[in-house]
Each structure stands twice: as C-alpha cells, then as structure tokens.
Amino acid sequence: MLHIYRSYIYGLFFNLCVIEVMKGLVGNPRPTFFDICEPDKAKTCNGSEYVSSYECTSTRFSKWFQSDSYHSFPSGHTSLSIYGGLFMAWYLQRRAFDWNHRTYCVVPVLQLVCLSYAAASSLTRITDHRHHWWDVLTGAVIGVLCPRTVRELQNKSTFEEQLDDGKSTDRTISGV
C-alpha cells in the first residue's frame, strides 16, 4: 500500500516540476493580464506596435498577482486535476474492481466521476478567464503523460534494484 502513496507523491512532484519549469521558461500572459497589471505602455499603445518593456501600474493587486498574471502557460490546475483524476481511476481499477461481485458497476461509475470532475475543473479555467484554451490543453497533456512517465521510471528503478540484489531471472549459471 505504501508504494501507491509513493507513486502518487512522485508523480505529483514530477508534475509540479514540469509545470513550474515550463511556466518560468515560456511566460505567456493570462487573459486577465491587462486588467491585473495595467502596463504603462498600454495606455498609449495604438495596437500596431509590439511592447516588450513595460511597468505594471496597478495598485489594486499585489506584486505577486501582477507577476503571476504573466505565467499562464501551461495550466497547473488542469495538469494536477487530470493527474489526480487518472490516478484515482487507476487506483480504483487496481484495488476495488471485481467482475464477480454484485456491485461491479460501482467502480466504473466512481472512475467516471473522478475523470468528469478533472475535466470540469479544467474547463472552468477557460470559462473564468484564468487561462487560454491552449494552456488548458497543454496542461491536460502533461497531466496525462505524468502518470505514465513516473510508472516507467519506477519500473526501471525496480528492475535495476533487482539486478543489484541478484534477483534477476536471466542470470547466467557459472561453471556450466
């Protein structure tokens, strides 16, 4: 049971690391960027010029919110919710599903609830104007790939531990 919690925590941290590195490298403004930051150049910009240097002049929001308004890509909430929903669906499949039991339809319904909640919480990031659709799509892709990547890394490390302990099944027999 402990390895399941370990797998979840590894995947969670792996997911967070990927998201934060991408947010720092890409730095795409949120749909609410102009309302939160109120850049000084936006007041005189006529729409045909590209502005790369600006000062946030808003006094309604803290510096942290102003800085965060430039870190939209990819959606961390989407990535984490998709990851959590997929992990819960996998966990229920592995631990609670039994075709021979009379309540065999309960687990698929619970899995559907987990995945629906993950999808709904992801889509609300678009409807509340916190992210663009491509931020949410990329976050969802990362959320889908993280469990698979962590599983592969754990399988590789388990195999290497077995080789180090001499428990591999393909050992050669000496003296033959």
Image: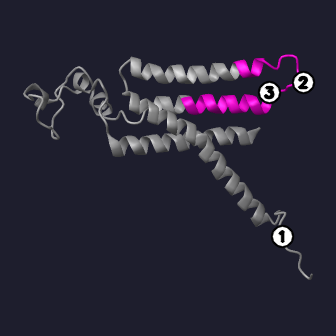
Q: Indicate which disc, 1 or 3, sits on the residue closer to the N terminus.
A: 3
Secondary structure state at the residue bearing disc 1: loop
Instruction: Name which residue lies at 89% across and 75% down.
Output: 173
Residue sitting at the far right? 176
Query: Label 3 belongs to which residue?
Result: 96
Quarter that holds the N terminus: top right
Which marked residue is nearer to the observer: mark 3 or mark 2?
2
Q: Indicate which disc, 2 or 1, sits on the residue closer to the N terminus.
A: 2
| Residue extent of the magenta highlight | 82-109
Among the 4 quarters of the image, the one containing residue 59: top left
Query: Label 1 belongs to which residue?
Result: 171
Q: Amino acid at mark 1?
A: Arg
Foreground residue among 149 and 5: 149
Quarter that holds the C terminus: bottom right
Q: Is residue 89 magenta?
A: yes
Q: Amino acid at mark 3?
A: Ala
Query: Label 2 belongs to which residue?
Result: 100
Horizontal and vertical percent position of residue 67: 29, 34
Horizontal and vertical percent position of residue 79: 50, 33
Circles 2 and 1: CB distance less than 8 Å?
no
Instruction: Name which residue lies at 56% across and 37% down.
Output: 144
